[in-house]
Amino acid sequence: MTSPGLTLDHPDRSPPLPHRAVALFDFDGTLTTRELMPDFMRFAVSRPRQWLGVLLAPMVLGYKLGWVDGRLIRAVIVWLGFRGVAAEDLDRLGHQFATDVIPKNLRDAGMRQLAWHREAGHRVVVVSGALAVYLKPWCDAHGLELICSDLAVQFGRMTGRYHGGQCVRDEKVRLAQAVLDAEPGAVVYAYGDTVEDEAMLAMADHAFMMRGGVFRIWSKVGRQQSAFSR
């Protein structure tokens, strides 16, 4: 049975509709057309601090080439962009971004699939490395559970550091596992779009990777074959 919202490369292999299920969705690139953290930085960070960000160009290039860990570059960007900023001001900007910017960048295929799971009565959880300051208002508006990265606040101002670990890779799995532990026996779906989502996809009974605007069935074997074909 193919879900109404699911566009697959192999439609006949789409999973059946289970009675109890949990659907884990990455956000950036899965529910949106691209990663939105750079958009938020341009939206929320002052112009002088943005000019300082130019110094990070070599690090950003290294990240795109796979030479620099994404966790490192995100930590540096957050420190440069938000250290000392009033938490109240950043919270206001996060709500504005959730209202004005995110809706313009949603991916139709991702949102259709999310809606299908909700209509089927499944538990739907967004699991993302994105920042709670803008992702939580959006999820709250849509009635979605959220697990994501958060920023630390001290004395009403941003410290420039993450509160706890970034919700990516193994940390993403650890936090998602807490959800699954509360749903023993449920069929698990997972949706992602990058290598950073693979650990979460490996937890699922039915895993899908967004490629070229299409959700493709993903498996550890399939991932290895794709790697060899590039």
Image (cartoon, grey):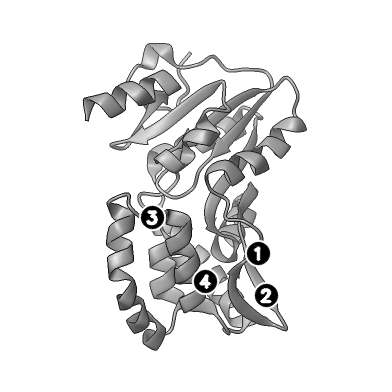
Residue 126 makes an appearance in the image: no
Q: Tell me which residue sits at (66%, 30%) in the image.
A: 121
Q: Who comes first in sequence, dot 2 or dot 4?
A: 4
Mark sitting on residue 176 = none
Q: Residue furthest bottom?
A: 48
Residue where numbered disc 3 is placed: 105
Number of residues whose C-alpha sits closer than 10 Å to that of mark 3, classed few (under 14), some (14–19) or many (20 or more)? some
Earlier sequence position, callout 3 versus callout 1: 3
Q: What amino acid is at disc 3?
A: Asn
Tag 1: Cα neighbours inside 10 Å, few (<14), some, or many (≥20)? few
Q: Amino acid at mark 4?
A: Gln
Measure how far apart labels 4 and 3 are at the Cα level: 14 Å
Look at mark 2 in the image and give the residue it sits on. Answer: 153
Which of the 4 image quarters holds residue 164? bottom right
Q: Is residue 84 left or right of residue 223?
A: right
Residue at image coords 30%, 54%: 64
Give coordinates of residue 50: x percent, y percent.
Answer: 37, 80
Residue located beneath label 4 in the image: 96
- Residue at image point 32% right, 49% down: 66
Question: Would you name the residue on which mark 1 appears?
Answer: 163
In contact (CB < 8 Å): disc 2 and disc 3: no
Residue at the farthest front position: 67
Dot 4 or dot 1, earlier in sequence? 4
Q: Secondary structure at mark 3?
A: helix
**Which residue sits furthest left?**
230
